[in-house]
Image (cartoon, rainbow, N blue to C red):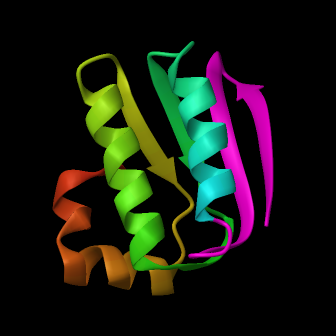
Amino acid sequence: MTIKVYEENGMTVVAPEGKIDHVTVEEFESKINELVESHDTLTLDMAGVEYVSSAALRAILNVNDTLESKGGLVMKNVNKKIMEIFNITGFADYLDIR
């Protein structure tokens, strides 16, 4: 997995690529937590993510909860397969997915 961070329209965008699973979730959490310390809002661009495990779901939920009291977490470009996981787990109702 690789993680790109860039600015787009005044927003910080985090764009992981590959699988977010038990092997890569620690790297994902570390990068996100580093950014949460200095940002009130983040956009998580899921275009390059091909798989999320339960560990990834937990990490996304933790980031969303942390940022909820600040500015929030926005998710974009969620593919059909991952959106199905979000729907089944109820995350689709909880997350700001655009």
Q: How many marks?
A: 0
Q: Residue at x 66, y 40 (%)?
A: 31
- Observer-nearest of 32 and 17: 32
Q: Is residue 71 magenta?
A: no
Q: Position of residue 77 (x, y in %)?
A: 57, 61
Identity of the residue drawn at 25% across and 64% down: 92
User: Residue drawn 22% across and 84% down?
Assistant: 88
Determine which quarter of the picture holds residue 20: bottom right
Whether residue 2 appears in this view of the structure is yes
79 sits left or right of 72 in the view: right
The residue range painted magenta reads 1-24
Seen at 31% across and 16% down, the residue is 70
Q: Is residue 98 visible?
A: no
Is residue 37 shown left or right of residue 31?
Answer: left
Residue 52 percent across, percent down from the top left: 52, 76
Quarter occupied by residue 65: top left
Task: Relative to 19, say whether 65 is above or below.
Answer: above
Q: x%, y% of residue 5?
A: 77, 36
Q: Is residue 59 left or right of residue 68?
A: right
Q: Give the quarter of the figure containing the N terminus.
A: bottom right
Residue 21 covered by magenta stretch: yes
**Above-or-below relation of 6 to 92:** above
80 or 16: nearer the eye?
Answer: 16
Magenta stretch, main secondary structure, is strand
Horizontal side of residue 88 vs 46, given as left or right = left
Against 93, residue 23 (above or below) is below
Q: Position of residue 32 (x, y in %)?
A: 58, 38
